Image: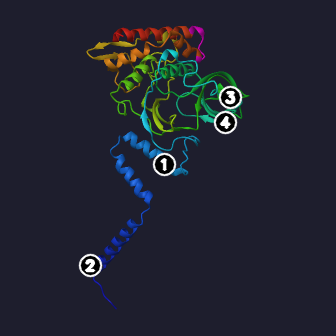
Amino acid sequence: MIHRSNSQTRTTILLFTLLSLISMAVTLPTNFLANASVFSTSERQSDHQRNLKNDANKHREDHHGAVHVEGASHAPTTIGRPTIRVDRGDISTLDLTLGIGSTEGMPKAPFKFEKEDTTGTNPKIKVIDANGVKWNVKFDEEVHAEIAASRIVWAFGYNVEESYYVSSAQVSGVTGLGRAKKFVGANGAITNAMFEKRPDNIARRKNDWSWSSNPFSGTKELSGLILLNVLVNNWDAKQTNNGVLGIFDKNGGVNEWYTVCDWGGTFGKYGSVFSHSKWTPRDFEKESYIEGVSGNTLKLHYKGKMSASHSVPLEHARWFAGLANQLTDDQIRQAFKASGASETEIASFSNKIRERLNELKKATGQ
């Protein structure tokens, strides 16, 4: 019988453990090493870009490259290039009736109920149309505001979600509604709704983006988006309403579109949770746009949830004013008409937007 001291035993155990670890390292799978290199590279990226990459990696692991984003099966599985704006050319030639949408892309009846959407503060349901396309259907006071604002924002080159005003429709199979119940008739009839598309070729990233820390900080393009939020009095421009959408470009590449995904809190007045308003002509008419110029900075009149600076470089404001000068009165009216607004609302809101753009033109000397 061989007798070992305690110290000899501990030494033997340590040597055995070390040999086991070395053996495991030699046989590590290649995908582990590849992921290790990704993580070391991501340490040099911004926190938000790293989160997007991890999100995409999770999607790839879920099902052999299929993206599981609200049932999406044709969406990008890789992270692309951060994008916030595209040049649409001569703005005066754009059709703001459809905006980012098209006649072919409009919702097609009949509609089948999928479930109620309980996110956010406004009543919504999810439906599937005759072509199998999924839609978020929003009701109540934000319907007109969101559609009109999105048309104007799109004209300036920024990304918006595809949406349409539907005056009336019928949805089959509706059941178990909560807050949306009063907006859906017993036979599934709905009126005055916004249909917002949820296409299967767009990846809805899980992480929102911050106004103060993003790939476009300090650029004229971000200043332009700030100017647009103030233009329409978007007091609800909080970070959680900012999303990143992974979208294929025409060449098959992927763009990560930094998008304001909710324009419902617009065309009213600023104020507290009890006093602010949406889609109220008399309130919107009383608000100003520009507070003045101080040195090389344009100060904006804003009292909402947007955490971005409420002033922009004068140089950036001049660039934006140059774009705004291309927008015609007819196009502004198109945006509001597309939202289902009444003639009185169209006239009031359109005149105020033109007044604000003239205010900007004067302040910037454009």
Q: Residues within 10 Å of mark 4 (few under 14, many from 20)?
A: few
Tell which residue pokes out farthest to the front in this image. Answer: 251
Give the residue at x 45% y 42%: 79
Quarter in which the N terminus is drawn: bottom left
The numbered mark at residue 132 is: 4
Whether residues under marks 2 and 4 lie with C-beta atoms below 8 angstroms apart, the answer is no
- Horizontal side of 84 relative to 172 (left or right) equals left
- Among the two numbered marks 4 and 3 on one chain, the one whose residue lies closer to the N terminus: 3
Residue that mark 1 sits on: 58
The numbered mark at residue 7 is: 2
Magenta residues (range): 338-344
Q: Element under label 4?
A: loop
Q: Residues within 10 Å of mark 2 (few under 14, many from 20)?
A: few
Q: Residues within 10 Å of mark 1 (few under 14, many from 20)?
A: some
- Among the two numbered marks 3 and 1 on one chain, the one whose residue lies closer to the N terminus: 1
Is residue 91 at all visible to an observer of this figure?
A: yes
Cα–Cα span, label 3 and label 2: 79 Å
- Horizontal side of 62 relative to 182 (left or right) equals left
- Among the two numbered marks 2 and 4 on one chain, the one whose residue lies closer to the N terminus: 2
Residue that mark 3 sits on: 108
